[in-house]
Image (cartoon, rainbow, N blue to C red):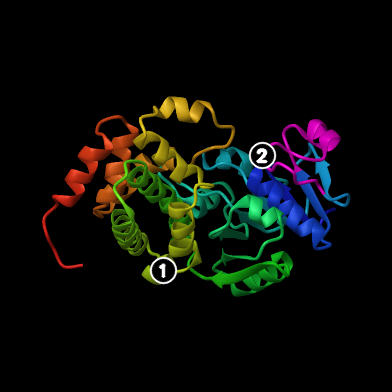
Amino acid sequence: MSEIGVIGAGAWGTALAVLWARAGRDVSLWARDAAALEKARETARLPGVKLPENLVVTGEIPDANILVVCVPMQVLRGMLRALPARKSPVVICAKGLEAGSFLLVPEVAADVLPGRAVAVLTGPNFAAEIAAGLPAAAALAAADSDLRATLMDALRTETFRLYGSTDVMGAALGGAAKNVIAIAAGAVMGAGLGENARAALITRGLAEMARLAVALGGKAETVAGLSGLGDLLLTCTGEKSRNFSLGLALARGNSLADVLGHRTNVTEGVATAPALLARAAAVGVEMPVVAAVAGLLAGEVGVAETMVALMGRALKDE
């Protein structure tokens, strides 16, 4: 039995597995194409990164002391259902809302795994930098203090610092909503609207995230931390961000279908935008930036019209 079982060999799952294996942890990495990954000992999703010799690649979902689930949000429910019955804690790295139900990560987990110890790992991290051993920090959110302390100790490394949080909903919301704001930030820059516009958009997007977090039972201060502001800054300013680069491409005249058709990794903000807007409407929270992104992705408005609408909103105190 492994110490840590990482489920999902995309860029993020592989990066975490590599990180922990290099730190001397006993790690298993589950992959759909386990045979091919085992033969190559590297993946196109993390070019140039070789899997450490002590990292076990498997096609069977590992029965580990800690399970770290790194799959896209829209397949999370099915993957959680497939986990071994053993009651080892589950750390979920997915970011987004489930289409149709509009549920966040901890809500899906509570629905599928009632009574199971679950935590959310989220923050401002690019997979390639984690795999390269560059310093980074993330938030690990779990309501139970003992569980939180145990997981933080087990998953931290010399280059990967973890901060604990009791606000699981707030942390999950920050990780989901920042992807949508990042699409807007990319569109602003792709349209040549300038750094002033991007800074204003990021700030107002953060305010929207805080309002919804509170409405869903989370804390506004959580959104000001690593899982909100930290992740927002990274994804809204770096072209390595799939969501930022999507907005950039849309503003430069590329179609959504064409951009997504050339990608192998999921751009979570596309499915999250309409789901987030619906969830906000259900609790009476206005999110104009998110609404603008949803309209842009649906092809209802262009970038120029979107900015005119945002700038023309009624004046109010911040």
Return the x and y of residue 195 as percentages of the image width and height: 33, 55
Q: Residue at x 67, y 48 (%)?
A: 13
Q: Residue 33 or 310: which is nearer the viewer?
A: 310
At label 2, the amino acid type is: Arg
| Rendering coords of residue 200 (x, y %) | 29, 59
Q: Is residue 99 visible?
A: no
Circle 2 packing at 10 Å, graded few (<14), some (14-19), many (20+), is some
Residue 44 included in the magenta stretch of the image: yes
x, y percentage for residue 251?
A: 34, 37
Q: Secondary structure at mark 1?
A: loop
Residue 104 locus on image (x, y percent): 46, 50
The residue at which mark 2 appears reads as 45
For the residue marked with disc 1, what is the amino acid?
Answer: Ala
Q: CA distance from mark 1 to mark 2?
A: 30 Å
Q: Which mark is residue 300?
A: none
Q: Is residue 220 visible?
A: yes
- Residue 224 - label: 1
118, above or below 292, in the image? below
